[in-house]
Amino acid sequence: MLDVPSHSHFLSIKRVSKNFTSRSDTVRALSDIDLDIRAGEFVSIVGPSGCGKSTLMMLVAGLTKASGGEILVDGRRIEKPNSDIGIVFQRDVLLDWRTAIQNVLLQAEIRKLDVTAATERARHLLKMVGLDGFEKSYPHELSGGMRQRVSICRALLHKPPLLVMDEPFGALDALTRDQLQLDLLRIWSETRMTVVFITHSITEAVFLSDRIVVMSPRPGRIERLIDIDMPRPRRLAMRETKQFAAYTQEITEIFMKLGVLREEGDA
């Protein structure tokens, strides 16, 4: 893991825009995104479908190019796929013919890491997320939540300084989602890597984050940045507090003003 001063801007997104052009039309997905994220910070991006959240993740990962502006990670401009970071998608994309630990160790093979050290770390990560004893299980033998845990371990094997997660818990049941949030926070507290977490869930964003980026409908803009001033470690009971409710209400009201949420009787 990179040793980056906690006060520094580890990820800088400067006036970034993204257009998608077809033969008949040009769609502006993102417009003038400015965002600085400190090393070790946990930042969630919340917004409606189609607001460009996933597009922004692809830009940070270097998997697609911005139409304007620039993105810097640890001072380096991202112009091609960024192999240093860890990425977790909504679907776990595990290889069916490999066991859980073999799926995690795929990173070691690609990066030509020391096999012994990588295997030890893989076992440690699997244990941290409650998969001790399931190392030799194949994906079809695991539940959806267990598969996503394996996917997270795979993304963390090479100790990335930056972890980008695109709605990783969106397809899971409520109890599994709660547990994976706790697992993620435990891993983050141990590693203090920088995390960019994309979600549709306001409560999930508030529970996990140091800061929340609230996005507008397309073309996606940053509508507001909200600091979440709640103690860590986070406990599930915190979701029942007045402070937690105030944060969720603040974000809900932003989306109501934007027309993303409408109640009966609203125009």
Image (cartoon, rainbow, N blue to C red):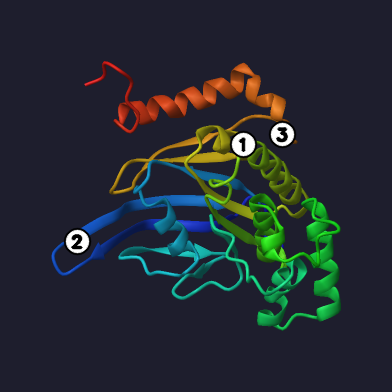
Kind of residue at badge 1? Ala
Q: Position of residue 42 (x, y in %)?
A: 61, 46
- Is 226 displayed left or right of 113 in the figure? left
User: Which residue in the protein does label 1 denote?
Assistant: 174
Kind of residue at badge 2? Thr
- At horizontal 35% and vertical 65% (from top left) the residue drawn is 66
| Contact? badges 3 and 2 (CB < 8 Å) | no
Circle 1 or circle 3, nearest the eye: 1
User: Which residue in the protein does label 2 denote?
Assistant: 26
Viewport quadrant of the N terminus:
bottom right
Q: Position of residue 45 (x, y in %)?
A: 48, 45
Kind of residue at badge 3? Arg
Extreme front residue here?
A: 141
User: Which residue in the protein does label 3 denote?
Assistant: 234
- At horizontal 44% and vertical 74% (from top left) the residue drawn is 79
* Secondary structure of the residue carrying numbered label 2: strand
The mark that comes first in sequence, 1 or 3, is 1
